[in-house]
Structure formats: C-alpha cells, structure tokens
Image (tube, helix red, strand yellow):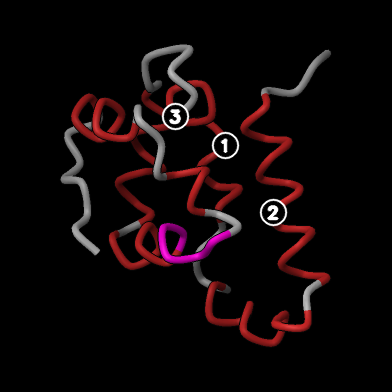
Amino acid sequence: MRLPPFLLVVAMALGLLLASPAAADFSALAPCDVMQLSPCASAFAGKASPTSACCGRLKSHGRSCLCRYKDDANLKRLVDTKHKKKVFTACKVPVPSC
C-alpha cells in the first residue's frame, strides 16, 4: 500500500523539526499535532473532497494551530496549498487570516 504524498511530506517535516537544533522550539507546537490532519491529505492534495473526518479534525484544530503550521517553513507547504480554500469552504471552516 502506497502512502499519499501528503503523509510522506508530513512525516519528513516532523522528522526535520525533531532533528533540528531548534527542536526545543517544537514544544510550542505540542498542543497542535499536524498528524491529526491526515484525514485531509487527499483533500489538501486536490485528489478528493474532504471527508467528514477531515472536516471534524479541521474544525477542532483551531486557528492558532493552523497559523503555526503556516508560519513554519517545514509545515507551510502541507496546509497552505492551492486547494486550501476549497477544503476550508467545503468544511464550513473560515480560512484563518494569520
């Protein structure tokens, strides 16, 4: 079974964050777990509509977490895609203005 590219990128980004000298700053992301958005992988990649699981996770994630991902160079490409607005709109979640 092949993993979606989104999940591979998430895993690599988290690995880079944990291995970097700035790993001490990773504690600021502790309440925010980007892996919780894995049900949204296909939607953010533009390959499928967001599922109810994706929308639920997106709604529960909150603006502060999403903005932290967007501000992080390693995670930005995961949640700041050209399909982001479609996913947020379909899930009836306001696109955070960070």
Tell me whether circle 1 and circle 3 mark residues in contact (CB < 8 Å): no
Where 98 falls versus 59 (above or below)?
below
**Which residue position holds label 2?**
13
Q: Main secondary structure of the magenta part?
A: helix
Is residue 56 or residue 11 the one in the foreground? 11
Mark 1, other Cα within 10 Å: few <14 / some 14–19 / many ≥20: some
- Horizontal and vertical percent position of residue 9: 68, 40
**Label 2 sits on what residue type?**
Ala
Tell me whether circle 3 and circle 2 mark residues in contact (CB < 8 Å): no
Decide if residue 23 is on the left or right side of residue 59. right
- Residue 63 located within the stretch drawn in magenta: no
- Horizontal and vertical percent position of residue 92: 17, 34
- Horizontal and vertical percent position of residue 19: 83, 70
Mark 2, other Cα within 10 Å: few <14 / some 14–19 / many ≥20: many
**Which residue position holds label 3?**
44
**Which residue position holds label 1?**
38
Q: Which mark is residue 56?
A: none
Distance between the alpha carbons at the discs numbered 1 and 3: 10 Å
Q: Residue at x 77, y 70 (%)?
A: 18
Q: Quadrant of the C terminus?
A: bottom left
Which residues, given as a range, are shown in magenta? 69-73
Distance between the alpha carbons at the discs numbered 3 and 2: 16 Å
Foreground tag (1 vs 3)? 3
Q: Quadrant of residue 14?
A: bottom right
Q: Residue at x 67, y 35 (%)?
A: 7
Q: Quadrant of the N terminus?
A: top right
- Residue 70 located within the stretch drawn in magenta: yes
Mark 3, other Cα within 10 Å: few <14 / some 14–19 / many ≥20: many
